[in-house]
Amino acid sequence: MMAKYDDESYVMLSLQTFFQGERLYEETYTQYGPAYYLMQSPIHRWLDIPITHDIVRLKTVFTWFAISLLSGVLVWKITGKKNLGITGMLLVMLHLEKLGLEPAHPQEIISLLAATGLILLQPNNRLMLLVAGLCAAFAGLTKLNVGATMAASFLFAVTWNHPNGNRHDKFLSWMASFLCCSIPAAIGWLVWKKVSGGAESSGLLLPFVLFLSTVTVCWMARLNPSVQAIPQKETSEPNKIKDFYWVIFGGAIGSIWVVIWAMQHGNNLREILWGVLLQHSFMSESFYQPLRFQTLALLSATIFFSIVFSFLLLKKYSEKSSEKLLPWVMVLPGITLVITAVLSIVGCFQPIEHGLSLRGAASFLAIAGPMVMPVILINKMSAPRLAIAMSGCLFPVLVFPTPGTQASLGTIPIILGLLIGVADAVQTKIKYQTVSKAIDRYLGWTVALAMIGSTFVFSSRWTNQVPLNQPGCNWVRLEASRAIEEQQIAEAIRNAPGEVLAFATHNHNRFFFWTDKIPATSINPTFWPWMLTEEQSEKITRALSSEKQICVVMDKSRDLIDAEPDLTPLSKEMSDGWELLTEIGQWQVGVRTKTTGETGSNLKN
């Protein structure tokens, strides 16, 4: 499969131009922070492995497996149950199926960093805490929202995993809680601005759910003192939370490392700030889409929150009454996990066409899952549990501003939390325990059988499809009609005059890898007429204007664009003097030719 919006090739081209010496942001267009390019350097710069579609897909397969494996290890480590660890690995692997749509995307490497950080978050282990903080910094300097949620979850875990006996400790604990609550609140404010401007009001549901669940996790941590709390020393000098500072120290080391590396590769602090933070205000304005969800998700979230909130009220004011509600609370992770498994299994047999398609369990988990996270803190509290519970409430913010594949990645901690909750229910003598025991025993086998079945289905489809057989793209197969169309377009582009290739609407960067044509500049986003700043648009216009002949491809398909771009200097530069060479389906391959006297005619005065 290969997504039509082609985020895959956009990221590939940004890697290629950067490794060819074009510095980030001012020359190489990218929406991502410099840490991603630092992490890719050993593979493509040191080992000189080429950037091709086959190579990046192979990297995605290894990363996909590593994320799933680490998730399973984390569940096994916390619950002590190997079978639940295997179930977790298989369920996460199935849950991340949309990674196949967007190979090379930075989201896969930051998910690996998140899983690694959760495993390394061990109290009193300075080195592990330092590296966990470093993972958060690298994630944040790739995608800021991921780094913020990782840092907030880690700091919350190490501060509340402590007696909090003095003012200093209490201040750090409440500061970490405030930081966690501020993240969904900030997203809610941004969505509110969009809704006030005419966007769908349903988009407010997600930040509202995440804020409520974050508050309930903080409340549960307050009511349940940690069983692994660091003991106070019997001295006149009270013990302080040192784990907090080791995480901060690791984050500082990682941040300084990335910033120095970026500056060594041509960036200044202003450009780094733009790449990590400032450009995203423009992106959130241009590409906001609310999360689509089923009625089941809203209904489940309402019921789950009512039960958990009632339990917390009773626990605070009437301990005996809360024990009567405990069986209902403890069964919630199992119910949520069964629904998740059913949605994932049904989805895994359906074709994957678009990252925004409503399939699998991601949207259900993003809405209903966070409400269940406090449950894993009822019987036991430890730093890893606290981190997973808070990550389950915060990581779904990854779906803002666009709920594509990020919805699957942002709900991984919820799956881990649900499995931990099932393990707790199995070990607690309560009513309905048989439900959790059945899940513990049979869910892994069910998921494994579904994965085997879907593998046969997709293998059969893959075998019956046609290989693209383009340079560096030999393993990719598509439906016969699309594969033939792609091959014909690539051949038409190769035969077109001029060495520069441009797309009048959507940027299909894969053809730069399959043909001998080059882009006019290193600024090549996907939905490019709409993703460019005025300065970037003018730079491309100048570069195109200096060329006598350029191959210009027009894609008339309506599923990729909502409207034709305005008659800007950039679009006029590609359309004035354009002549059709060949038409293939909805694609038109042509050449724009201008005389020497016309050079620069469409530039702004």
Image: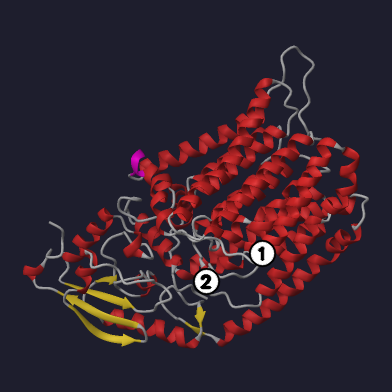
Main secondary structure of the magenta stretch: helix
Element type where label 1 sits in the image: helix
What residue sits right under mark 1 in the picture?
A: 93
Q: Nearer the viewer, residue 316 or 430?
A: 316
Find out whether residue 453 is within the magenta segment: no
- Residue at (6% x, 68% y) in the render: 597
The residue most toward the left is 597
**Residue 471, numbered label:** none
- Left or right, 115 with respect to 593, comes to right
Percent of width and height locating residue 602:
15, 65
Part of the protein shown in magenta: 267-271
What residue sits right under mark 2 in the picture?
A: 354
Q: Split into 4 quadrants, where in the image is the C terminus? A: bottom left
- Left or right, 224 with respect to 264, comes to right
Q: Nearer the viewer, residue 322 or 117?
A: 322
Element type where label 2 sits in the image: loop
- Residue at (68% x, 38% y) in the render: 157
**Quadrant assignment, res 511:** bottom left
- Residue at (20% x, 69% y) in the render: 572
Residue 312 visible at all = yes
Residue type at mark 2 is His
Q: Are marks 1 and 2 in contact (CB under 8 Å)?
A: no
Residue type at mark 1 is Met
Find out whether residue 268 is within the magenta segment: yes
Percent of width and height locating residue 387:
68, 43
**Quadrant assignment, res 333:** bottom right
